[in-house]
Image: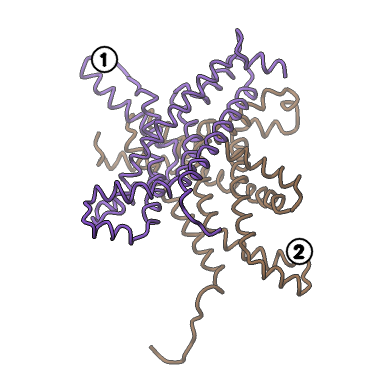
Chain colours: A brown, B purple
Amino acid sequence: MNLFDIPFLVDNFLALCRGIPLTLQLTVLSVSSGAVLAMLLAGLRLSGNRVLDGLARGYIFVFRGTPLLVQLYIIYYGLSQFPELRRSFAWPFLREPYWCASLALCLNTAAYSAEIIRGGVIAVPLGQIEAAKAYGMGRLTLLRRIIAPQALRLMLPAYSNELILVVKSTALASTITMMEVTGIAAKLISASYRPVEIFICAGAIYLLLNFSITRLLRFFEHRLSRDQRPHVVATGEQA
Amino acid sequence: MGAYFDLMGFADGGWGVDMLRATAVTLAVALAGFGLGSLFGMLSAAASLSQIPSLRHLADGYTTVLRGVPDLLVIYLFYFGGSAVITQLGHLFGAQGFVSAPVFLTGAMAIGVVSGAYQAEVFRGAVLALSRGEIEAAKAYGMGAFLRFRRIILPQAARFAIPGLGNVWQLVLKESALISVVGLVELMRQAQIGAGSTRKPFTFFLTAGVLYLVISLVSGAAFRAAEARAMRGIRRAS
């Protein structure tokens, strides 16, 4: 085993890069649909209605308490147990590993994100909400002007952790035949029996992806917290 | 419902015994991995809190890489890497072909290395939560580094670490399902075997899911009890 076999490393790195589009597609698809579901769940959690709250709690408990692999296998392998489903309109989707992986990731990340969103919303100072109500703001305006912008900023650090988890979780799609970065890595390893080199290449790709995502979100957070930073007062003096 | 209990029951032709045995394997591999992870985590936390810059960078690199790379990839690395080493050794002694690495050990190592990176952060946070004054007082008393660690740092840091360790344990438990890809017959793999031979995948994976939930519930309660016990002498504003 020679770690400095540069041509081998380059070849494998390029081969692994062909998996990046699929990894990103799975991430974007599941994160965006998961965010919608998470908002819904967070809404139920905060609704003040005990039945709705309990429903959302149960969903979050189940999806956070079981391995993602179980969820993925139930959707991909398990659902075929029901002949009614196999005849239904949804089957063309549920037959495809791509949609099964996206669905499992979406349902899973929604459970985690819902709690992050809820945390952000309840962290908005109560006084501001009372003040907005005193101004006569309706519920929608209150949400749009006061709660949403602040909750978004407060939840971003936790949400960026969740995004990294999703990027890492897309690797599980390789267990249902998807050829994303980890799927290609497994294929290359069993073809060449040089796991260390291929791990280095694939690991570098994931670290790069995660690094870019955290940077992007940090930039976003910086933009959103403009009012929190000390003002730069123009004094007119030349430095 | 009756059909379900026939399938998962303990009578002849039921899968109950196999599923429970596999649950025990899941627990064993998760515990072994968690224990190894505690060891790696403590070493890494000690390195990241040390005065020596190169040790700090090493620990930083370890936690960054292992927390940023999919667990599945780490499992493949250990399985195929271990197999490559063992196959090489086998050839030295005249064995032919591919010799696979022992899967339990592979799984425990992979979980250990990954969870070690998470536990390192937990331990580091716990040590940093100690009041500096106590450590200074211990130094002023003339305690050596080891005695200081054993008498002052460890008992208090362990207390602060419990909630974080509880989170890592839940992670480890779920991660152990991934070991099924290299063929260890733990809960997930057993469910696959059952699903394959009875053509009832939904039933088997759902049962596996419920068993994971039960373990997670019970161990969650255990961690909360441990936390309550460890914190009984601490006054907290709440």
Residue A91 drawn at (x, y percent): 70, 30
As drawn, B36 above or below B17: below
Which amino acid, mark 2? Leu
Residue B178 drawn at (x, y percent): 48, 31
Residue tagged 2: A140
Which amino acid, mark 1? Ala
Residue B215 drawn at (x, y percent): 54, 31
Residue B95 image label: 1
Q: Secondary structure at mark 1?
A: loop
Tell me which chain the residue with mark 1 is part of. B
As drawn, A209 above or below A70: below
Q: Residue at the spot x=55%, y=36% of the render? A: A68
Tell me which chain the residue with mark 2 is part of. A
Label 2, label 1: how many angstroms apart (C-alpha)? Answer: 73 Å
Name the side, left or right, on which B231 lies relative to B3: left
Name the side, left or right, on which A221 lies relative to B31: right
Q: Where the N terminus of chain B falls, by quadrant?
A: top right
Q: Secondary structure at mark 2?
A: helix
Nearer to us in this view, A209 or B187: B187
